[in-house]
Structure formats: structure tokens, C-alpha cells
Amino acid sequence: MRVVICGGGVIGACTAFFLARRGVEVIVVERTGVANAASGKAGGFLARDWCAGTPLDALAQRSFELHARLAGEIAGDWGHRPTTAYSGIVVGARDGRRRARCELGWLADGVIIAGRLGTSDTTATVHPHKFTMAMMRAAQSLGAELRSGRITGIIRNTHDASARGVELDGGVIESDAVVIAMGPWSLLAAEWMTLPAVFGQRSPSVVYDSGGDVPAHALFLDLHDENGGTVSVEVFPRADGSTHLCALSDIVPLPLDPATVTPDPEAIARLERIGERLSPLLASDRIIARQACFRPVTEDGLPLIGKVPRSEGLYVATGHNVWGILNAPATGEALAELIADGASRNVDLAPFDPIRLRALDPSLLRST
């Protein structure tokens, strides 16, 4: 069996690994580079039970378990580290709630910790770029092939319209199945098959070289800004000595080429000021990356994982929003089982079936 995976992000890499581990011939086609988009620029926060009571719960539980297991099974160090997560607020100098010292010694005085959201048993972090690269290398070590190219269409059998491969710049790759895992750019595949809409939400972030000074404290903070508004801020220290800070997501047109994604300079400037308010360890002279990525989002907030409606041999895995890094291993495992065996064993994929949502009209793509 041969499977073509369109997209070299974390979902594509994990799907390639679990398929290759089953002995399936896998070809990953990537346009701009492995982990070039959100998979390389996300926060890398993992939570076992933060999706409890939602359709994502079983997927998240399984994936959290797989993250811990893969860290001991696959060569490479992507910084899987148990973490304590805290909630809190950030207040100004004139606020009466300001304390002389923050409970977490590395933070500035204006940061008030309100509670603990997760322990080292329930929350963790990974370096997303290193994790995605390690999963792709692991897939390649099992025989998967990585090709550079841009998918331009699906090849179908004339007698039953089932997929028999992909068209790409400069050639054709024949296969028994095709997986669309292109993040928000999966939207482009709606011209070739019946797919619901996938939107892109831009998320700017800055990354600091914080060395060993910042402990494993993931922060979810409400910051009261100079305009009287409230900004939700997330801070993720990593095992390699870097710290990821993000906030201020917005909706802007998705560029056709992932390589052209750039952050809004104003948003980055605001993030730098936020970092300086949070800790002296998050000073602007420690910044090593100013970046942005587009998270894939669906109409109902749940990912698309499963068979493409009214198409044999076509599968999709995208729309994971903020939980892409967390849920990638279980998504790849479940999709590999669906393709090879006809059903997923560990996770029920019914809540993520693409057929639940209205299909996008392809003419809307051609008119924009």
C-alpha cells in the first residue's frame, strides 16, 4: 500500500510515522519545509485533561500518553518536560492588588498568581519544531520518503472516481490513498474534493533566550493594558532554555505561500512590552525570534479527521486550532489505523468526521 501525505507539519509527520511503522509505503509532499508554519512556531503546551467534557477529551488523553511514550522510544531530544501551569493576572503599578513580591520568584511584582491549573502529572511542554522534525526523521528511518513540491490536484480512476494519486509541479505520484494535512492551506484542497472550510487565525509570538533561569512554569495570564482592556497572555518556558510568549491573535487573509507569513510589527512591539512587564528575564535584548503563524480553525472548532465525503481513498486531518501539537500523535495513530485497517481502535473519530459540516463552494476560492 502506498499513501501520499500532503503537508509536512506536525500532523503530516505523525501520520507518516504511524503509517510507516505499520509497513505502509509513505511519501510526504511538502512545499516550503518541514515544520515551516504553525508546527514550528507554536507554544508546544500539552495538557492531559483540559478538554474534559468535550469531544476532544479522548483524543487529548491518548495523545498526552503518546507524547510521553514517544519521548522514550524515538531518537532525538525535543524537550518533552512535565510542567506546572498557573493562572494569574498582571496589574499596573497603581493597582491596589500589587504585591511586594510575586509567588514565583522569576516574575515581576505586578504578576499575581491566582491558582494552579495543572501539575507535572497533567501538563507538559515540548519544542514543537524539534518534535515535528524528530517525527519526520523517525518516519524516514522506517522507509517514508520526503519530497519537495506543491500539490495541484488529485488523480482519480475513471471508472469509479476513487483517488489514485496526486498531481504536483513537475509530475505525478500514484498512490492508493491521499491524506490532506496542510493546516489552514487545506482550504485549497476544496477545489479538488468535497471539504468543509478551514480558516487561518494569525498568532504572533516572541521567543526569548532565557537560559536556565526560567523554571518549568507555564503561565496563562490576563493582563490589564494601558488602554483599559484585557489581553490573554501565554508563556511557555522550554527545556532547551527558550521561552515562548504569545498573545494578540487576529484574523487576516491567509497568504497563498506559507513562506511569506510575517507578524504584524505593532503586535510584536506590544508583545515585547508585555514581556518586560512580566519578568526581567523577558527583556527585549533576549529575544531570538519575532514570528507569526496561522492556526487552522474550523466552523465548529473541532478538527477534521477522517475520510473525505463522497471520495474513496481520500482522507483529511486538519483544523486542530490551539491543540495541534498536543493532538498530533493520536491523530496520526488514528488516521493510520483508519487507512490500514478501516477503523480507529484507540480514539472514536466520529466527532471529527468532515461530513458533519457544510462543504465549501469551490467557486468561492476561484473568485478570491
Image: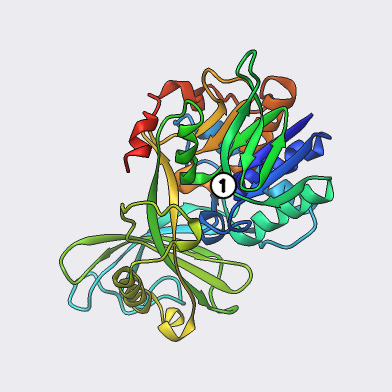
Residue 283 visible here: yes
* Occupied quadrant, residue 226: bottom left
Foreground pick, 130 / 355: 355
Name the colouring of the figure. rainbow
* Occupied quadrant, residue 82: bottom right
Q: Residue at x 72, y 56 (%)?
A: 134
Please, is residue 138 above or below residue 312 in the view? below
Pinpoint residue 29: horizontal percent, then vertical percent.
66, 47
Pinpoint residue 187: horizontal percent, then vertical percent.
45, 39
Residue at the disc numbered 1? 326
Q: Residue furthest front?
A: 170
Q: Secondary structure at mark 1?
A: helix
Q: Residue at x 65, y 61 (%)?
A: 130
Q: Is residue 174 left or right of residue 98?
A: right
Q: Is residue 50 left or right of residue 34?
A: left
Q: Quadrant of the C terminus?
A: top left
* Occupied quadrant, residue 87: bottom left
Q: Residue furthest top?
A: 159
Q: Quadrant of the N terminus?
A: top right
Foreground pick, 63 / 24: 24
Please, is residue 29 above or below residue 90 in the view? above
Please, is residue 102 above or below residue 295 in the view? below
Foreground pick, 313 / 159: 159
The residue type indicated by label 1 comes to Leu
Q: Residue at x 51, y 24 (%)?
A: 353
Pinpoint residue 300: horizontal percent, then vertical percent.
37, 32
Counting every numbered tag in the picture gives 1
Residue 62 visible here: no
Please, is residue 271 above or below residue 229 in the view? below
